[in-house]
Amino acid sequence: PYTSRIFAGTQQRVYLATRTSIILFDVVRSTVISEINFMNAKSVTFDDSKENICVRSSSSILTPKADLTQPSIFNESSKIKSCCFNGSSVLYTTRSHLKYIVKNASGVVCSLPRVLYIIKAQNSTAWFITRDGILFKREIEMSEVKLKSALIQSHNEDVAKRIIKENPPIGQAIMEFAADNQRYDIAASLARDPKTKFEMSLKSSDFKTASEAADELNDPKYHKILASSLIEAGLFEKA
């Protein structure tokens, strides 16, 4: 097929970029293995396992499996300069920021003093190159990224709690993110006002914390709601 760019794959495979798609091509058999719509790809980067790739255009990042299955596309309003993996997350640079993507979440890691191109990241260290070809490394704050990743992966409950303990205070946005991902226990621990703490505690069946929040609210309606929830849970003696 006609292609504007060719990127290295694994084994005898390469990725071909056309104006409208990215193609996984078997060089030996001269056959198209898979194809996905994605306009004007400028780079393809593997993660450490070689199981996932991030494909960059000027305005979007595609993150499928290496065989182009399970694709997810993230659109950015600023021009994307570079991208790479850091564990299960993707870091990318714009003209003035280093940003991250974790599943369906995104955010800013830090501001950048000038245009930089990220070429590698590992834990809290990232390697950049300038427009003048100068390579350097820089420590970056990854707590928010690690926490969101842990919240999405339910088996990382202890990891999430450890990150919260080691990095206070955690902002309101993280509390809302935890709730959106049905991690109501984490959301309750992060809630600053008693009403939200009460609501999140009930959803996570943490009746002890809900009772404490109801006492703080000092409103009979919250004790009635708590009593109803206890009865529904079969805890008649506590209601």
Image (cartoon, rainbow, N blue to C red):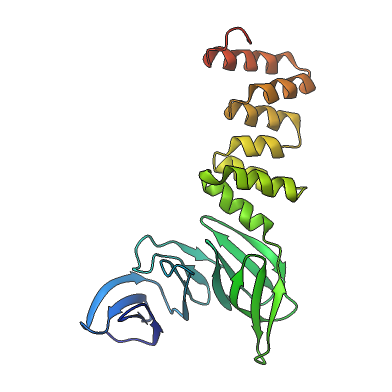
Image point (27%, 84%), residue name: 27
Name the image quarter holding residue 199: top right
Q: Is residue 226 above or below residue 34?
A: above
Q: Can residue 193 be seen in this snapshot? A: yes
Name the image quarter holding residue 22: bottom left
Q: Is residue 63 above or below residue 118?
A: above
Residue at the outermost top position:
237
Q: Can residue 170 be seen in this snapshot? A: no
Residue 36, given in percent of the width and then of the height, sits at 34, 69
How many marks overall? Answer: 0
Residue at the outermost bottom position:
132
Q: Is residue 90 above or below residue 208?
A: below
Q: In the drawing, does residue 135 fall left or right of residue 203?
A: right
Q: In the drawing, does residue 29 fall left or right of residue 17?
A: left
Residue 203, given in percent of the width and then of the height, sits at 58, 29
Name the image quarter holding residue 7: bottom left
Residue 74, given in percent of the width and then of the height, sits at 50, 64
Image point (34%, 86%), residue name: 3
Task: Give the quarter of the figure containing the N terminus.
Answer: bottom left
Residue 139, given in percent of the width and then of the height, sits at 72, 70
Image point (63%, 26%), residue name: 206
Task: Give the quarter of the figure containing the C terminus.
Answer: top right
